[in-house]
Image (cartoon, rainbow, N blue to C red):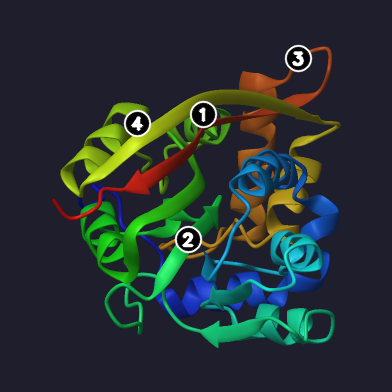
Amino acid sequence: MHRSVKIPSKKRISQSFGMKASRYDQYAEVQRRYQEVLREQIFKEKPQGLWGDLGCGTGRLLSDLRQSFTSTTFAGIDIAFQSLILQQKNNCSIKLINADIERLPFKNSSFDGIITTSVLQWVYNLDSFFSDLGRILKRNGMFFFSIFTTGSFQELSKARKSAGMSDPISLPDPEQISKLLEKYSFKEFSLTTDKEIVYFPSARELLRSLSAIGSTAIAEKSMTRNQLHTFCKVLESTCATGRGVPLTYQSVIGRAKLEADS
């Protein structure tokens, strides 16, 4: 499944997240919660062998897992080199690999488990990603993930449309994720949909929070100061409530097992 909207270049994504790595955990409220949900599920699985976290970022989840499963080998894979440097200071026992998750440099059947949280929205071709995921996982290997789906960031999309700007966000729906798992021989999978709304005191605070976690990387040119001022006014006039300016996150949180050879 190709995206109908242009995804930012890999260089731009890497730079954006790398520059904000030191502040990511401070601002990534929703992403942290999804990590906690997956952490509990993975703990029940009692991971063994080799597990990889694709788009590991600052490595918070890997650090927790490594402390509890000392005989398991964990690898953190991320396109943002600065994130890995930051992680290396705290997680010297975790293998760190600077790589693009759409061009995974691993042999077939390398991993016993794969984790990815709040990353797949940056993947241009999800069909190709799931195909490669099935390649690097061992049979009966586990896949734990969260992904933002349609309906996320709807306030930003509405404001951009009202301001006469294009919408740079293109997200899959839960049914597409289910179909891709089936297509690439994942079984026993369970998917949970989740909706979170975070409120900010102003449009600028909303955008500042997104910027702090690198999520303002887009394929087109950044807004000028005047465009930013206009956009904030439109965002507040079209979306603000008594609780503040909302930002909606809709996600699928899931676990799946790769089918064994018959």
Closer to the chain start, of discs 1 and 4, is 1
- Quarter assignment of residue 223: bottom right
- Residue pictured at 80% horizontal, 51% vertical: 27
Q: Amino acid at mark 3?
A: Thr
Camera-side mark, 1 or 2 = 2
Residue 241 is labelled as 3
Disc 2 versus disc 3: distance between alpha carbons?
A: 40 Å
Determine which residue is flagged by label 2.
114
Q: Nearer the viewer, residue 25 or 232?
A: 25
Q: Residue 52, labelled with which disc?
A: none
- Sequence-earlier tag: 2 or 3: 2
Q: Where residue 98 sits in the image (x, y, percent)?
A: 52, 86
Nearest to N terminus: mark 1 or mark 3: 1
**Amino acid at the residue labelled 1:** Gln
In the displayed structure image, the side of residue 129 where residue 12 appears, left or right: right
Q: How many marks?
A: 4
Q: Residue at x 37, y 46 (%)?
A: 257
- Res 200 quadrant in image: top right
**Residue type highlighted by circle 2:** Ile
Task: Measure how far apart labels 4 and 2 are at the Cα level.
Answer: 21 Å
Q: Disc 4 designates what residue? A: 173
* Marks 2,3: beta carbons within 8 A: no
In three-dimensional space, the C-alpha distance between marks 1 and 4, rounded to whole angstroms, equals: 14 Å
- Report which residue position mark 1 lands on: 154
Label 2 secondary element: strand
Of circles 1 and 3, the one toward us is 1
Q: Residue at x 55, y 50 (%)?
A: 118
Left or right: 90 with respect to 217? Answer: right
Question: How far apart, in angstroms, are the residues tagged by discs 1 and 3?
Answer: 15 Å
How crowded is the residue under tag 3: few (<14 C-alpha within 10 Å), some, or many (20+)? few
Asked which secondary structure carries label 4, the reply is loop
Question: What's under tag 4, amino acid-wise?
Answer: Asp
